[in-house]
Amino acid sequence: MDISSFLTSLLTSFVIFVVLVLLFTWLSRRPGNAPVYYPSVLLRGLDPWEGRGRGTRSPVGWIRQAFAASEPDVVAAGGLDAAVYLVFLSSVLAILVFSAIVLLPVLLPVAGTDHALEDSTGRVPPNVTDFERLALGNVKDESARLWAFIFAVYWVSFVTYFILWRSYKHVSNLRAAARSTSDVKPEEFAMLVRDVPVPPPDQTIKDSVDSYFRALHPDTFYKAMVVTDIKKADKIFQEIEGHKQKIAHAEAVYAESKTTNRPEGTRPTHRTGFLGLIGKKVDTLEYCSEKIKELLPKLEDEQKSTLSDKQQRAAFVFFNSRAAAASASQTLHAQMFDEWTVTEAPEPREVIWTNLPKKIYDRQTRQTVVYLIVFVTVVFYMIPITAISAVTTLQKLREKLPFLKVVVDQPLLTTVLQAYLPQIALIVFLALLPTLLMLLSKLEGIPSQSHLVRAASGKYFYFIVFNVFIGYAIGSSLFSALQDVINNPPGIFTTLGARLPGNATFFLTFVALKFFVGYGLELSRLVPLIIFHLKRKYLCKTEDEVRAAWAPGDLGYNTRVPNDMLIVTVVLCYSVIAPLILPFGVAYFALGWLIAKNQVLRVYVPSYESNGRMWPHMHTRIIAALMVYQATMIGIITAKRFYYSTILFPLLAISLIFAYTCHTRFYPAFAKTPLEVASQQLKETPNMSTIYTAYIPPCLKPEKLEDVEVFEDAQSRTTSRAPSF
Amino acid sequence: MDISSFLTSLLTSFVIFVVLVLLFTWLSRRPGNAPVYYPSVLLRGLDPWEGRGRGTRSPVGWIRQAFAASEPDVVAAGGLDAAVYLVFLSSVLAILVFSAIVLLPVLLPVAGTDHALEDSTGRVPPNVTDFERLALGNVKDESARLWAFIFAVYWVSFVTYFILWRSYKHVSNLRAAARSTSDVKPEEFAMLVRDVPVPPPDQTIKDSVDSYFRALHPDTFYKAMVVTDIKKADKIFQEIEGHKQKIAHAEAVYAESKTTNRPEGTRPTHRTGFLGLIGKKVDTLEYCSEKIKELLPKLEDEQKSTLSDKQQRAAFVFFNSRAAAASASQTLHAQMFDEWTVTEAPEPREVIWTNLPKKIYDRQTRQTVVYLIVFVTVVFYMIPITAISAVTTLQKLREKLPFLKVVVDQPLLTTVLQAYLPQIALIVFLALLPTLLMLLSKLEGIPSQSHLVRAASGKYFYFIVFNVFIGYAIGSSLFSALQDVINNPPGIFTTLGARLPGNATFFLTFVALKFFVGYGLELSRLVPLIIFHLKRKYLCKTEDEVRAAWAPGDLGYNTRVPNDMLIVTVVLCYSVIAPLILPFGVAYFALGWLIAKNQVLRVYVPSYESNGRMWPHMHTRIIAALMVYQATMIGIITAKRFYYSTILFPLLAISLIFAYTCHTRFYPAFAKTPLEVASQQLKETPNMSTIYTAYIPPCLKPEKLEDVEVFEDAQSRTTSRAPSF
């Protein structure tokens, strides 16, 4: 890529960004758009413009507000998970800023005043850009200047350790504070039990769970709730809900049709067949009420039979104190690990019910299979990526597809296309993955949504690093490179070292494109805005429907975090090769932090709260990125035939030790609830019945079963074939 | 090594063994030797010959008894750890027997009827032994006969999985049974707390421990005992004990000297200087009584100051039920992992007091350093081993050291020496290691003796496998081989594969020597017998001294297990290369099981009880040996240019999955106490004060401090500089 297409790319990206920000400033000030730009504020029952005076309406008001909001504000608005995500962004920002203030003034002059890229006559060839002249590539082999680069690697590493240590401590305290609040949270009184053994024939599962835990925790056991197979009950429940919505919609339509001219109005009708397009035409209001009347007794029957006959081998066990629940969930219960496995209970809203009854061997097998699939996918997705990187020069494309000549020969279009084609290919490609990975992770048998997101984003990270980074960097001669690596694993350093510098410009453009266009779209929310207005105009008739049209969703950590991690990896790896990438990295994370904070305060609504359990995951991956960086630098400096590069080896060991130390020191408090935290005094005596009810799935608790006693009795009803005595 | 020296080695070993067994039969029947051959029986207060009639005195009576003893007998006599060790031996025996009954009839004809070792004229060269002709080496390259060997590897692997799974289950049940007995064991009511944070200045450590655990376990906390620095108190205590022993000894000597001729006798004297050889001559009885009188008040003062001023940042916390202790020791207590770390308490008699107060970072650093040292030692001990294997042929030795000619030129001596020299060098070499490894492991900060033994024997295993097996097998060209391996790690398979077959005879002799001579010595107990008789005749005057002279000690798992593991590894690896090694392996473990059972029933007395925690360690190492074997076989068969060897690769994966499955299924019940087990009913109401007293170190609980209240008060006495209020 030459300098002009690089600048074009940068400039167009920037223009798009500015346009989008201006759009945002204009659109977000129109009250009608409030549900798009302030949904979180509205949902918390506040007025978006209340009490903030002129500031809010000024073009930069949102920036001022984002800066002004404190961490507790963020926790209050978006939960601890959002606050932890902001800590992640600011930590990376701090790492890059501290790196930049030393690396830029030191390395640019050192590299810029050397002459490796000059030809024999002492002149710089015209195809070498200034950008390349200010990078490691311009330093001669065996030059003593390489000491500066070795120092830089050490500096970046220690800055990373320092910032990460502080951040881990900070997040750890945040988590402890959030967990020791005096609010009653149902999940803190519960424990999830899986792999319940088959009960004797005269007992239901519920009875055996009850008697087992009552015997082991005689003083603290409150109640147990057995997980049931709610598939059928849920289907009927959803049907009823659907009919209710249809009635509400039809009533609104009916009311609208009663104009003064035709006070009787038109009763809305629909067809009962496929998609309402074929079949008998019926009066919607009558038909749906009829259906509901039909379904309600069915639901009731189904609820009863579900509770008594469809008990699964998993349960929630409730204790009468937080400390008892915390202690019990950390204690091994059965002699055989494949029975009565206990874990902390997830929040009721994030439970994945269908995964709970999966047996331990089933889970292990599924996990193995899923990891195999992911591994195979990582390896074979390299083929399309390799193809992309081989075809990315338009000249090659033109040779192979002559009919493109007309397009390619237009100079302006060529420049733009040349600047964007590979990046767009990559971005589209990556957009397809998260759904697949969430699906795969769900198949593993993971019991909660937050865990699922962590698992999926872990896989996505490997995907991204292996495919995009290593895949693109090693580029077109991937397979020969792979061959080298297999025959000579330490050679991966030199292979990476030899190939990375050439791709610096590509990744610079990639980062720039991602943040200008990505953040512009994120902030301006153009897509949700258009969808909202279309829906409101043509589809929504009731309040509920309008509310559903602007429901903001949550932050989507499973794609956000790995994408940010890719940028971290890329920027770290190039920080010493081509220090000019650092300002772009700083801009990415500074803007990212600002925009994410704005979105957290005003837009997104968390769908669950894991109290920062995402952090250890982020922490480990930042260290992984750092180690990729360190290994790469060893290779690059060795490739310059500068054998003092060996003094970088200890860094790899230090990184491992650092990761291990952080893990032993901080991780246990993330994986388990410390007794110190669980023993905090509560504000009020917990209402155990409310806690218990929180875990009843919606399809099992409407109307007649609202009384918990009935629910319980239904579960305990002995379905004995053999008499109890 | 040629066939004659091999047979000589075998024959002499066997003769030595027979002589030693005859000696044992003769010696063990003499009542005066009972303390050497029946110490465990005597200590349990039984009569060695009681009620067993003629059988005991018949030459094979011990064999009959060993077979007759059931597992509960073994547990009663030698504890669960001994029973688990016997399970280990019998499991390996079963693996080898099942392997042998298929491998011998299948592989011997397949190998024996091929012709790879014949020269071009179709005759077998005279230097090829029958032993070599019946091995894999005689199969031609690319021969379809190699399918039989591939099948054999699969057979051995699946036999191993099957036996190991059954054994793990069996040991797991043994452990559960042992742990759920209704006897009161102090360690089941206690929990070890380390990394106690520095208390505020107006509190002692004892106070802060008390208040912390009382707050977190209000209903179940009984008492806490802070670990103190007992070095000085223990020194005084030992001095007093030494003087007491001297007085007892001197009194016996004095009484002996009062013959009818000289009724006044001679008062024993000794010199006070170095080793009693120089210095002033004093009357022993008077001098020692004087000394004790002097030391007693000193001890008392020291005890008091130890308890109040030398409190360390570690403690034992006692609970009023087993379930509470089990649950508490598995629960994370503090938000920061480097404070208040809790683990299950070890038995009082196996506590390593000096290691308890070591902080977590100290422990981690020490562990890292120790592993580094072990790693360096593993690598550098290869040099002497290589030297040994280079010099092991006497001819080479003779060339280098001409003065040995006289010895070497005697034909008989040459044969014997040639047969034994390398093996003896190895055995002597390995005998030096265990002490070093125990010392190193102790430096890691491990809190209990049983854990220490596991750690040391783990290190010893790596040592043995790397040095003896790989080191000797790769042999004289070790460094060039190492070079190959570093450049091309997968090449380790081919390297091992190419070199192993040639050393089969060496290892066969090694196994034979080990079991014939080793077991002969073990059974006949010649060394303890001689020492006992010498001591009794010349040194012991009092009953206590005689008792000390025959004290049998325990089984010494830290050397036994790794040595057995070496044999397992060697026999497994050669089982397919040279199936004739299998009968030797079977003999080793059959004899080993028989003799170990005899020794457990009659001789050794366990010095601690870890309830079979050694088993997971043995299990993992058997799988490691199996994987070395599988990898080696892949190499060997590939070296025969038979590329279907790739169908052996899945075996490596299966082994890993098997190990992982066993680990998740069984290991937690070894690392922690399941609540099910801890909640068993007790025979009697536990006497909490006895439980507490069990953990007071001997030097802190004599005479005046026998009253626990005093001990406690001394610990709680506030040493405040700032007034409490």
Image (cartoon, coloured by chain):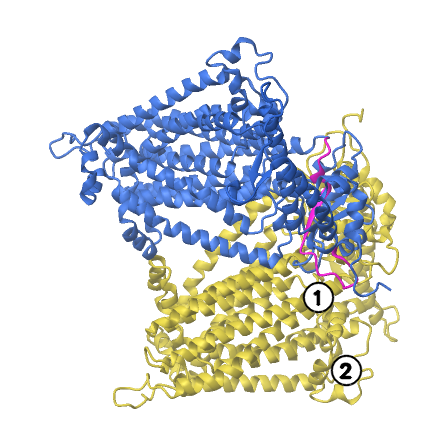
Chain colours: A yellow, B blue
Question: Is B556 colored magenta in this rendering?
Answer: no
Tag on residue A173? 1
Residue sitting nearer the eye, A97 or A470? A97
Above or below residue A106? Residue B672 is above
Q: Quadrant of the N terminus of chain B?
A: top left
Measured in 3D between alpha carbons, the distance from the residue under mark 1 to the one under mark 2, in whole angstroms, is: 39 Å
Q: Quadrant of the C terminus of chain B?
A: bottom right
Give the farthest residue toward the left: B121
Judged from the image, the secondary structure of the residue bearing numbered disc 1 is helix
Mark 1 vs 2: CB contact within 8 A: no
Q: Which residues are magenta?
A: B183-205
* Res. A613 image quadrant: bottom right
Q: Is residue B133 visible?
A: no
| Residue type of the residue flagged with mark 2 | Pro
List the residue tagged with mark 2. A31
Residue sitting at x 76%, y 48%: B224
Q: Position of residue A530 (x, y in %)?
A: 67, 76
Which comes before the other along the chain, label 1 or label 2?
2
| Residue type of the residue flagged with mark 1 | Asn
Above or below residue A470? Residue A418 is below
Above or below residue B77? Residue A148 is below
Read off the chain for label 2. A
Q: Is residue B116 left or right of residue A53?
A: left
Q: Is residue A157 left or right of residue A485?
A: right
Above or below residue A445? Residue B164 is above
Q: Position of residue A559 (x, y in %)?
A: 59, 66
Task: Tell if the residue under mark 1 belongs to the same chain as the one under mark 2.
Answer: yes
